[in-house]
Image: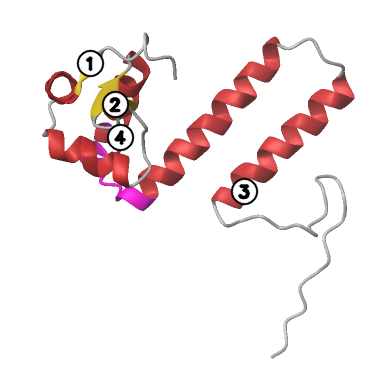
């Protein structure tokens, strides 16, 4: 991050999002955000960091999600933004399909639902045999 973009010290950032500064430090330790550091100690928060903190706060307070869930939700939100950006790129249909497939695979991996050997859509799935 460019230090010119990071303009809020921790006390101001905490006030902007109505959180205690120790909560911001906790979120940093958990890896949920990474403020810019000046001279190793002073944390500076960008407008993007403030938006991320507001998103974290909403997920925790309004959705009741724990920090592990917040981490997952933030990662999925990043992938969803990547998908939206693909729409604006000038790429051919096959390349678009490939990149969408890769992003979908990443999202499934984040959710622990990745099936590396699963058939693609339109392909037959093996039938599950029930023994009984």
| Residue at mark 3 to residue at mark 2: CA–CA distance | 39 Å
Which is closer to the viewer, label 1 or label 3? 1
Q: Callout 2: 10 Å neighbours few (<14), some, many (20+)?
A: few
Which is closer to the viewer, label 4 or label 2? 2
| Residue at mark 1 to residue at mark 4: CA–CA distance | 18 Å
| Residue at mark 4 to residue at mark 2: CA–CA distance | 27 Å
State the residue lying farthest toward the bottom.
132
Task: Identify which residue is drawn at 43% across, 40% down.
Answer: 73
Which is closer to the viewer, label 4 or label 3? 4
- SS label for mark 2: loop
The boundaries of the magenta stretch are: 58-68
131 lies left or right of 11 = right
Residue beneath disc 3: 108
45 lies left or right of 1 = left
| Residue at mark 4 to residue at mark 3: CA–CA distance | 21 Å
- SS label for mark 3: helix
Q: Position of residue 22 (x, y in %)?
A: 14, 39
- Residue 112 occupies which quadrant of the picture? bottom right
Q: Is residue 25 above or below residue 44?
A: below
- SS label for mark 1: strand
130 or 106, which is in the foreground? 106
Residue beneath disc 4: 56
Of the numbered discs 4 and 2, the one sitting upstream in the chain is 2
Say which mark, if any, is on residue 39.
2
């Amino acid at each position: 991050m460019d230090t010119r973009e990071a303009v809020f010290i921790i006390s101001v950032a905490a006030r902007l999002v109505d959180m205690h500064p120790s909560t911001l430090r906790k979120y940093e330790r958990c890896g949920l955000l990474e403020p810019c550091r000046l001279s190793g100690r002073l944390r500076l928060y960008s407008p993007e960091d403030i938006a991320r903190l507001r998103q974290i706060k909403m997920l925790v307070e309004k959705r009741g999600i724990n920090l592990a869930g917040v981490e997952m939700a933030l990662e999925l939100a990043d992938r969803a933004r990547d998908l939206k950006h693909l729409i604006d790129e000038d790429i051919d249909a096959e390349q678009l399909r490939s990149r969408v497939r890769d992003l979908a695979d990443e999202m499934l991996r984040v959710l622990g639902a990745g099936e590396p050997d699963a058939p693609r859509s339109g392909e037959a799935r093996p039938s599950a045999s029930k023994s009984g």
